[in-house]
Image (cartoon, rainbow, N blue to C red):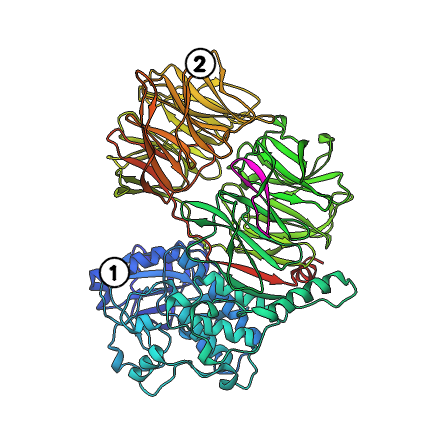
Amino acid sequence: MTLTAGSRLGAYQIATPLGAGGMGEVYRARDLRLDRDVAIKVLPQPFAESAPALARFEREAKAVAALSHPNILSIFDFGRDGDTAFAVMELLEGETLRQKLAAPLPVRKAVEYGVQIARGLAAAHGKGIVHRDLKPENVFVTADGHVKILDFGLARQTPAVAAADVTASPTEARHTDPGTVLGTVGYMSPEQARGEPGDHRSDLFSLGAVLYELVSGRRAFQRDTAAETLAAVLRDDPPELTLATTAGVPPALARVVWHCLEKSPTERFQSARDVAFALENLSGTSTSSPAVMPASSRRGGRMAAGIVGVLAGSALTALGAAAVARYSDRGAAPQPLTQFSIALPPEHPLIHLGMVNVGLSDDGRRLAYVGADGSTQRVFVRALDELDFTPMAGTEGATNPVFSPDGSSIAFMADTRLKIVSLLGGAPRIVTDAVDDLPGAITWLDDATLVLQRGIHSGVIRVRTSGGMPELLLAPSSDKRESATVWPQLLPGGERLLFTVAPDSIASYEDAQVAVQPLGRPGERTTLVGGTTARYLQTGHIVFGHAEALMGMRFDPARATTASPVQRLLTDVSTDRNTGAMQLAIARKAGTLAYAPSSGAELSRQLDVVDRGGRVQASHTLEGELLPELSVSPDGLRIAVRVGKANDDIHVYGLTSGTFSRVTFEGGDEMNPVWAPDGRHLAYSSTRGGVPNMFVRTLDSNAEPQIVLKSAKPQRAMSFSGDGKWLAYTEIDERTGSDIWVVGVDGKDPRPFARSEFFESRPSFSPDSHWIAYASNESGSMQIYLASFPDGGQKTQVSVDGGDDPVWSGRDLVFRNKDEVLAAAVRTSPAVVVGKPTLLFRGPFRGGFYGHSFAALPDGRFVFVKSTSEQPRELRVLLNWFDELKRRAP
């Protein structure tokens, strides 16, 4: 084919043809603008005249161009030049995997290629792109060993499968054509072979087929005809890898391949990131594992779910005991890393909520996590040599579980109290009150004391396990523009504290710092590194979180100095994007690590409008990550919501217009939007200038926002009175926790409304301005109360079984108890009468810390931030991890 350089292609000097690329032709060319060699793929006739083909060519070119991943072929340009459609790509020097397979590949090299392919697929899947035709011909290995995935459906033929060659027969159809085979025979998944659409897990099956071929030298489902090959994909297992090759495939690698090749998508790895993780940990040190499973036992849900396989019963007990004994003997030789996965009960998924909700006993033998249990959450525990998790009685509403040093008890936070429960049973006992059960961690020391943060803005305390008055170890400093000192741990010697400093607000953890400070000497603070959730280990390291990666480096606790470069240890730890909490626990004595892998799913971007029965009336997908802090305008047409990014801002969304606009530009974090009754003003809190203080902005004016009240203590705007004269807010005090205050909208006459040693939050004015509903734990658990305004003289309890987040809907007081939304009818004249709360509907909600996660519309419907993030389905356990840490960060 001859290319005619026109207005678009005139920027490229066409050189030699490189051959066919799917249904396109590929040419070497020179980019005259950037002075570089490129490859140009063009659509020949008749595809160039096909509107659907051109539309798909453009759609997928743009999608792949947006990936920008080192393991995916880059696309630099796309367009039309007359009748020619073209895409400009990076020019690769090397050969395809098909060409590489002409000679046997070492297992090490096959694993290296597999890791890179999995990483590229993970990037594509994260953008919603499924390859659907992964095969050795579509994987390129450059001269320096980098893997590039090619042809994400940009241009592929559509011949009939039965007439095609078995080795390379690409087939394609429109996404909307059910029953049409899509993929390449021998590499396509069973669901593709049945003509079903498939999803990202179809690519994982194809990856398994490629891996099989890389390590065995033969195709997994090779038959004489295409029809027979399709039948083999649907019903047959490939030959055992140990039988298919004389190269000696490690059993752990064989298990990874089998797990990819499961016939049912639900039984495969659930993400390409999981495959990459499994392969990466094979490519480093040798992996201790049992013998390869026979084919008859490869199928079957949980048995196939482990990375290394199921280690249960006495075998796992022996491994755990050996790990403990080995690490106590410092003269023993380093042990190989051994890892496996434990499936979580589907009916009890892990609860995030910004806390560290995974725990591991110091001897490495017991695992705990906080899971959903109906409308509440509780701690679930299992020994590693058992098969099931057991719910712990009395741990309803728990967060931040941590085992005692001897493993016999668990400390946790619930209902703003610190509690301890024995694994032998019995009711939990209260250690201390007025603990803000928000993001944090508890350190249980060997001397029967606990170190924890009292609250986000209330500093770090130490308390005896037997109870008594807590000792304040550290308070956040407003002079340093910080609002939280969290994840505390006393270093050896008990004179220095390791912790995370969060600047400005709880949602600023991208800028958080790991620091060390001698007790009582704030002027001697040392900042170590950017990150969160830091932990010192007796190996002489600190480990900490950065994004979803676990980092580590050598550390001298006596001098508070680092002694080695930072090393990336894990790349997929489930991490809360607002608080930096990593779902990870480490056994101090055993050297074992357990963590929840990240799903890679996007967090909440959706607002749902529901009726009083919870039926969805409308769903709105917005730009940015929506945080559970929202407010409805008085006319019910606009929603003010906090949107998370580097600096959080308030945006307003029109429910009928569909417009979405940013309204704050102050440079700090803006939060807790509250509409004024006139619909023209919006109150919110901002970290501009230090801790959160309250501002009011006129929406139809370019005037600067006016500060309502400035204080050294963090304040959160919550509710206007119906007459527009008062603003209710919460204030964080290091002595009393969270209190409720009111202030005139002119900033005058601030006064406490509900201030005690208990935790009061989320005030909400009644429509007539004479009452304030709020949440408090004064009765022992968080409940909803109603008190008269302004004196608070009349007061009644509204909820019975727990409640939070009260809002008014007409005369009904509506509140949330975990994922349940309940309503209680309220009559205030001539006397206060509160009806029995009744269930309206269930979430799912994305719970918040201070703001309202849902709001009432004037027509009786509700709008809430829907939780769209995927919960982890398993916990990964790494035995002998301390030895691995010392290898990685010597």
**Drawn side of residue 205 relative to residue 689, left or right:** left
Question: 309 and 283: which one is in front?
Answer: 309
Amino acid type at mark 1: Leu
Which of labels 2 and 1 is toward the front? Answer: 2
- Image location of residue 285, percent across then percent down: 63, 69
- Image location of residue 420, percent across then percent down: 60, 43
Q: Residues within 10 Å of mark 1 (few under 14, many from 20)?
A: some
In the image, residue 395 above or below residue 832: below
Provide the residue designation for mark 1: 54
Amino acid type at mark 2: Asp
**Drawn side of residue 497 relative to residue 228, left or right:** right
Q: Residue furthest front?
A: 426
Assess whether residue 222 is covered by the magenta stretch: no
Provide the residue designation for mark 2: 791
| Label 2: element kind | loop
Quarter that holds the N terminus = bottom left
Q: Could you tell me which residue is drawn at 61 percent across and 70 percent down?
A: 314
